[in-house]
Amino acid sequence: MATTLFFLLFFTPFLYSASAPNHNAPQDLVRSSCINASYPSLCLRTLSSYSGPTGTPRDLAQAAVKVSLARARKASTYLKTSVTGKSKRERAALSDCVEQMAESVDELSKTLSELKHLRGETFEFQMSNARTWVSAALTYEDTCVDGFEGVDREVKGDVKKKITNVAMVTSNALYMIRRLDESGGLNR
C-alpha cells in the first residue's frame, strides 16, 4: 500500500506532464525558426505576438508575409498622406517611392494568395513564385530608400526608417518561405 501511494504521489506528475499536450509547441516553432532569420529578434517579436496560427512552417510563412504586407500597406499610406517633399527632387523621390511601395504590396499580396493555395503537385512551382515575388517586394523597398540619396536629411531619415523596417520584416518573410520550401511543405 505504501509503495503504491509512493508511486502515485511521485510518478503521477511526470506521467501527466509527458502525456499532456504541448501548448508551447507553436512558440517553440517560432523560436527555432527565427533563430537563423535575417533579423532574429524582430522575427521573434513579430511572430510571437502574431494572433493567427503559427503551428506549422506554412503557418509561419503566411504569418511572416501577412506581417510584411501589413507594414508595407501602413508605410505606403504614410508616404501618401504624411510626407511632403519641399523640393522638386524630394517630391520626385517620394512619388517614385509611393509607386515602388504599391508594387511591393502587390508582390506580397500575390505571395500570400499563393501560400494559401499550396498543392502537392505544384508545390515547387508555387514556392518558386513565392520566393520570386517576395524578392521583388524587397527590391522595391530597397529601391525606394535608395531614391532618397541627396535629399533633405529629415525627409530621407523619416522615410528610410519606415521603409527599412518593412524591408527587414520582408527579409524575414523570405527566410520563412525558404524554410517552408526546404521542409517540402510538411505539416502544410
Image: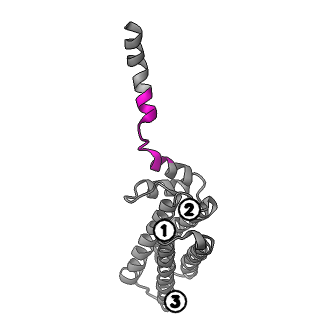
Contact (CB < 8 A) between labels 2 and 3? no
| Chief SS of the magenta region | helix
Between residues 83 and 180, which one lies in front from this camera angle? Answer: 180
Badge 2 amino acid: Met
157 or 74: nearer the viewer: 74
Label 2, label 3: how far apart the Cα atoms are? 37 Å
Q: Amino acid at mark 1?
A: Val
Residue 113's spot in the image, x, y percent? Answer: 47, 75
Q: Are marks 2 and 1 in contact (CB under 8 Å)?
A: yes
- Dot 3 and dot 1 residues touching (CB under 8 Å): no
Residue 68, percent from left and from top: 47, 69
Q: Is residue 48 above or below residue 148?
A: above
Magenta highlight range: 15-28
Determine which residue is flagged by label 1: 65
Q: Where residue 148 appears, x then y in whole percent?
A: 54, 80
Q: Does 73 appear in magenta? A: no
Q: Secondary structure at mark 1?
A: helix
- Residue found 35% across the figure and 82% down from its top: 81
Front-lying residue, 115 or 79? 115
Residue density around tag 2, few if under 14, some if 14–19, many if 20 or more, within 10 Å: many
Mark 2 and mark 3 lie on one chain; the one further toward the N terminus is: 3
Give the residue number, with chain letter if any, for mark 3.
89
Please tell me whether mark 3 or mark 1 is closer to you in this view: 1
- Distance, label 3 to label 1, CA atoms, is 32 Å
Residue located 43% across and 87% down the image: 86
In the image: residue 161, left or right of residue 175: left
Q: Amino acid at mark 3?
A: Arg
Question: What residue occupies the far bottom of the structure in this picture?
Answer: 88
Residue 144 in the image, given as x and y percentages of width and height:
54, 80
Tell me the distance, in whole angstroms, between the alpha carbons under discs 2 and 1: 9 Å
Label 2, on which residue?
Answer: 176
